[in-house]
Image: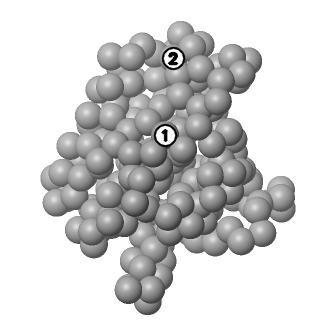
Amino acid sequence: MKLVILDRDGVINHDSDNYIRTVDEWQPLPGSIEAIARLSKAGFDICVATNQSGLARGYFNLTTLNQMHHKMEQLVVEQGGRIDKIEYCPHSPDDNCFCRKPLPGMYQHILSCYPDIDPGQVYVVGDSLRDLEAAEAAGCPSILVKTGKGNRTLLKGNTPKNTTVVDDLEAAALHIIYHQRRSD
């Protein structure tokens, strides 16, 4: 079994510093839905791990978040793929929870659902330093996309040393599939 963990905002869909608050505001990035379907068709389980402090801040409710995720899942299904699991952290940064990235709680929970998979073989794709730090803490290799906050993250120059940098989720999918085939 093969597994990929994706961040949501800035990787799969457009991000906003004012938060994605409605289903209509949730818009996929070009090629991202097709990239998820490509990974799924290549035999990867796809999990999404996303900080959603907008819940704690009252910007949207759980029903709206579930509708956003349903929209995302349906778009992937229409392309012939699937998303196997969605984990989200509903807490604010001040809640000191273990699930909020950069802490590895969401990744560790996902990995616990796949006990036969070596974390060192699970790619994490994100656009922020906190995605990469959580991946490193969970023992997973990371890929930084330049979409979303990716270029800002790259310019800060403090990414974990073995991070792969690509343009977008489509490029990440191609990289993951290529490296998986080489290791089979």
- Tell me the residue that label 1 is attached to: 109
Which quarter of the rendering shows the N terminus?
Answer: bottom left
Type of colouring: one colour
Q: Which mark is residue 55?
A: 2
Rendered residue at 83%/58% (across/down): 158
User: SS of the residue at dot 2?
Assistant: helix
Task: Say what amino acid the circle numbered 1 marks.
Answer: His
Q: Is residue 61 above or below residue 155?
A: above
Instruction: Estimate the x, y position of residue 148 in percent, counting from the top left.
Output: 58, 50
Give the label, 1 or 2, closer to the camera.
1
Tell me the distance, in whole angstroms, between the alpha carbons under discs 1 and 2: 20 Å
Quadrant housing residue 68? top left
Residue drawn at point x = 16 percent, y = 60 percent: 80
First in sequence: mark 1 or mark 2?
2
Q: Amino acid at mark 2?
A: Leu
Res 176 → quadrant: bottom left
**What percent of the width, then of the height, locates residue 6?**
47, 52
- How far across and how far down the image is residue 15, in percent? 54, 41
Q: Residue at x 47, y 32 (%)?
A: 88
In the rendered structure, the answer to whether residue 84 lies left or right of residue 99 reads left
